[in-house]
Amino acid sequence: MSFNLVHIWHSMGFLAKFIAAVLLVMGIASIGVVIERLLAFSRSAKESLAFAQKATPLLRSWEVETLLATAKAHKASALARLFAAIIERYIGGFETLDGNITPVELARNESERQKEQLGAELRRGMSVLASVGSVAPFVGLLGTVVGIIAAFQGIASTGSGGLGAVSAGIAEALIETAFGLMVAIPAVLFFNYLTARVNTIELALARSAGELLDEMEARYAPPSNRGRTSDVGERQAA
C-alpha cells in the first residue's frame, strides 16, 4: 500500500478518526497560542520602547504626575502598566502619611503584586502548550493501540493470518503515533522558547521597577523635611 494519507484516513475506524481529530485540535490550539503570544510580546515590546523614551527625561526631572499620565497612555506595554501601578500607589501613599508605612514601602509592596500579576498574564495560554507537549504522544499511542486492535479483529473475523494481512492495518495505526509526535514536538519547543522570552521580560521588568523604587527612595523625604521641589513633594508639604 502506498503512503496515501487520504486513503489511510478513509480506511480508519471511527475511534481512530476521533483520536486523529483530537490531535488536530491540539495542534491548532498550539499554533493559536504561539501566534497570540508572539504578537502580544511584540506589541508590548514596541509600546514599552516608546514609553521608555518618554519616561526617561520625566524620571530624571521627577515629574511623577506627568510620568503617571504617560504610563497610563501606553496600556499595551507591560512596563508602562507596572510603572503606572507603582507610581499611583506611591502618590496615594502621601494621603496616609500618619500611618506606619511610607509611600515608598507601599509602592514596593505594590510592585511585587504587579510583577506577579504581569507574570501570570505573560504566561497566559502557555499551559496549553505544556499540556499538548506532554499529552499528545500518549494520545497518538492510544490511536495506534486502537488501530492495531482493529487490525487483529479483522484477522479474527476473516480467519486469514500472516504479516501481509496485518501490515496495512498496523501501518495505518502507526500514523497516529507519528501524528502525535508531530503535534507534541513543536509544542514543547515553542513552550521552552516562550518561557525563555517571559523570563527575559520579567527580569527587565524587575530591573526597571527596582530603578524606579530606588529613585523614589532617594527623592522621598519624611514629613519633617519640607524642602521639596517636585509635585509630590509639594503635595506632601501641603
Image (cartoon, rainbow, N blue to C red):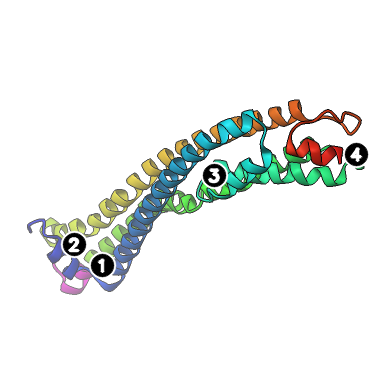
What's the magenta bit mostly, secondary-structure-wise?
helix
Q: Earlier in the sequence, mark 2 or mark 4?
A: 4
Q: CA distance from mark 1 to mark 3?
A: 53 Å
Q: Helix or strand or loop: what does disc 2 sit on?
A: helix
x 37%, y 56%: residue:
32
Q: Nearer the viewer, mark 1 or mark 3?
A: 3
Q: Of tags 2 and 4, which is closer to the observer?
A: 4
Could you tell me the amino acid type at mark 1?
A: Ala
Residue in the foreground of this view, choosing between 102 and 37:
102
Decide: few, some or many residues near mark 2? Use Cα within 10 Å; few <14, some 14-19, many ≥20. many
Q: Which residue is mark 4?
A: 100
Give the residue at x 11% y 59%.
4
Q: Which mark is residue 190?
A: none
Q: Residue at x 39, y 46 (%)?
A: 38
Q: Amino acid at mark 2?
A: Gly
Marks 2 and 1: in contact by CB < 8 Å?
A: yes
Q: Is residue 201 above or below residue 120?
A: above
Please name the residue that numbered disc 1 is placed on.
Answer: 150
Q: Position of residue 166 (x, y in %)?
A: 17, 60
